[in-house]
Image: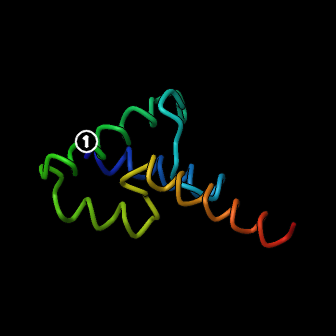
Amino acid sequence: NQWEEMFALLVQFQQREGTCNVPDLHKEDGINLGKWLRTQRASKKKATLAKEYQKQLEELGVVWNVLENQWEEMFALLVQFQQRE
């Protein structure tokens, strides 16, 4: 099915890049993977994403709240910098 095909593209991206944080406009094999992932995040937020799909995405390493995750990463870097200086 189409979802599985898109998930396979996400797996391909994750294996190559080491992350599931696909830029919004990124295309994988000519297909807009970034838009698809944004749609999956929106579906989860609205509680319309199938639990099976949610589980597969989480096991692959998808971050649901990108801004919160970025904040946590930057804060951790700040703490490291402070401890080093």
Residue shown at 14%/46% (left/top)?
Answer: 46
Residue shown at 53%/36% (left/top)?
Answer: 23
Judged left or right of residue 25, residue 82 is: right
- Dot 1 corresponds to which residue? 42
Q: In this view, does 4 lie above or below 55?
A: above
The location of residue 12, given as percent across then percent down, is: 55, 52
Which residue is more in the foreground, 62 or 3? 62
Residue shown at 13%/52% (left/top)?
Answer: 47
Judged left or right of residue 73, residue 63 is: left
The location of residue 61, given as percent across then percent down, is: 46, 64
Which residue is at the far right? Answer: 85
Q: Is residue 58 above or below residue 43?
A: below
The location of residue 56, given as percent across then percent down, is: 33, 65
| Element assignment for label 1 | helix
Residue shown at 12%/49% (left/top)?
Answer: 48
Quarter where residue 84 is shown = bottom right
Which residue is more in the foreground, 82 or 70? 82
The location of residue 4, given as percent across then percent down, is: 32, 51
Judged left or right of residue 5, residue 48 is: left
The C terminus: image quadrant: bottom right
Within 10 Å of disc 1 (Cα), the crowding (few <14, some 14-19, many 20+) is some
Q: In this view, does 22 lie above or below 32?
A: below
Amino acid type of the residue tagged 1 in the rendering? Ala
Which residue is more in the foreground, 80 or 10? 80
